[in-house]
């Protein structure tokens, strides 16, 4: 039983429209699902991914309008690492980000920057046989586009305390300065950096949790394994687009294990993903109440004339 790398990463934003402008507009990801936070249905949950909405490329945001800016500290993910194909992509992104008003720092095969709320990103040139998970964008040549997640980096005081859970329970293999979760389709990395002195603050621009990908058939078994390791996972929660369990790993980072599928085409066709407000059946009765309170979002895709 192996986890298939990173399934999705969920972060917090205070401004859904600005978030769409950055992730769909500047970074060129596809908004693949516009729905509400199932645990706080008055606010958006936005999902961006590659063209098909694949796990491995899916960054999601809870919108808490007006939320104060957070900061990553011990027990929190502080950087999301994306794959790109070659150094030319770093040149391209450095220019594109600068034109959009974002400074990026180049370091060899890597380019680091923050989004408008301080969420840390890194583009890394990675040689891999994993499928590139790419979204279409008229201004971004496919060979230069983001190709999905490579890693998340978290802050921890004492990473050694997570080793047993990561290696013995979750099957992560030591890799570079961290670990790799690699299944039959895809791999994703997890690594720690020394914590900054200040305590972390959950808020806008911080990561809420990272989800690792499981086949649907193995999902229950993963939960049993996590229980046997003495961690305390939630029951399996049906998120409609996937099923999930959540637990904290010993360094404090909130982990989720989510199923690959059913996926985002369960309630809208591939060509129209993310265009309308999607409410899973259990939440559909709230539509009349919820839809008028959500600020309408402008998706840059709507302005593309030809594809
Ligand atoms: Zn999640």
Image (tube, helix red, strand yellow):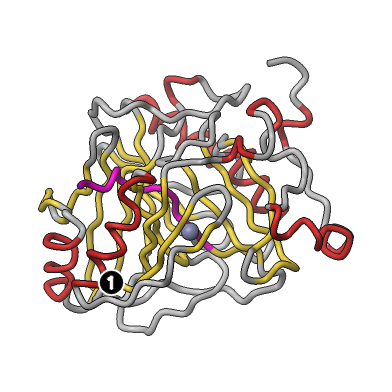
| Quarter of the rendering containing residue 217 | top left
Q: Is the shortest distance between ligand 1 and the CB of mark 1 under 8 Å? A: no
Give residue 271's position: percent from left, percent from top. Answer: 67, 25
Rendered view: 204 above or below 1: below
Quick one: quadrant of the C terminus? top right
Closer-to-camera residue (94/48): 48
Residue 232 position by quadrant: bottom left
The residue labelled by disc 1 is: 249
Residue found at x 36% / y 32%? 84
- From the viewer's perspective, tell me whether residue 302 is left or right of residue 97: right
Q: Residue drawn 43% across and 69% down?
A: 235
Query: Where does the magenta region start and end?
Result: 1-11
Q: Is residue 111 above or below residue 92?
A: below
Residue 174 image point, x, y percent: 10, 53
Above/below status of 247 relative to 46:
below
> Residue visible at 46% across and 73% down?
71
Residue displayed at 30% across by 41% down: 110
């Amino acid at each position: 039983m192996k986890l298939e790398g990173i399934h999705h990463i969920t972060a917090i934003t205070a401004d859904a429209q600005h978030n769409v402008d950055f992730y769909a507009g500047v970074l060129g990801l596809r908004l693949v699902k516009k729905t509400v936070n199932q645990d706080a249905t008055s606010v958006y949950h936005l999902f961006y991914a590659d063209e098909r909405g694949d796990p491995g490329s899916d960054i999601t945001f809870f919108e808490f309008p007006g939320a104060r800016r957070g900061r990553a500290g011990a027990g929190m993910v502080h950087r999301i690492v994306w794959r790109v194909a070659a150094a030319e992509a770093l040149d391209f992104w450095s220019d594109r980000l600068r034109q959009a008003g974002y400074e990026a720092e180049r370091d060899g095969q890597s380019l680091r920057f923050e989004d408008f709320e301080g969420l840390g990103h890194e583009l890394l040139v990675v040689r891999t046989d994993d499928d590139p998970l790419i979204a279409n964008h008229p201004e971004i040549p496919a060979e230069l586009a983001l190709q999905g997640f490579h890693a998340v980096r978290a802050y921890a005081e004492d990473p050694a305390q997570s080793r047993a859970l990561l290696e013995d329970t979750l099957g992560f293999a030591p890799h570079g300065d961290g670990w790799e979760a690699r299944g039959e389709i895809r791999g994703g990395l997890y690594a720690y950096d020394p914590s900054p002195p200040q305590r972390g603050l959950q808020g806008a621009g911080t990561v809420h949790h990272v989800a690792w990908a499981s086949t649907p058939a193995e999902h229950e078994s993963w939960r049993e394994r996590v229980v046997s390791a003495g961690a305390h996972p939630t029951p399996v929660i049906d998120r409609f687009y996937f099923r999930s369990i959540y637990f904290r790993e010993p360094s404090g980072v909130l982990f989720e294990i989510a199923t690959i599928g059913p996926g985002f085409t369960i309630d809208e066709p591939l060509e129209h993903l993310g265009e309308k407000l999607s409410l899973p059946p259990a939440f559909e009765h709230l539509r009349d109440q919820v839809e008028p309170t959500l600020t309408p979002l402008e998706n840059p895709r709507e302005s593309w004339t030809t594809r």
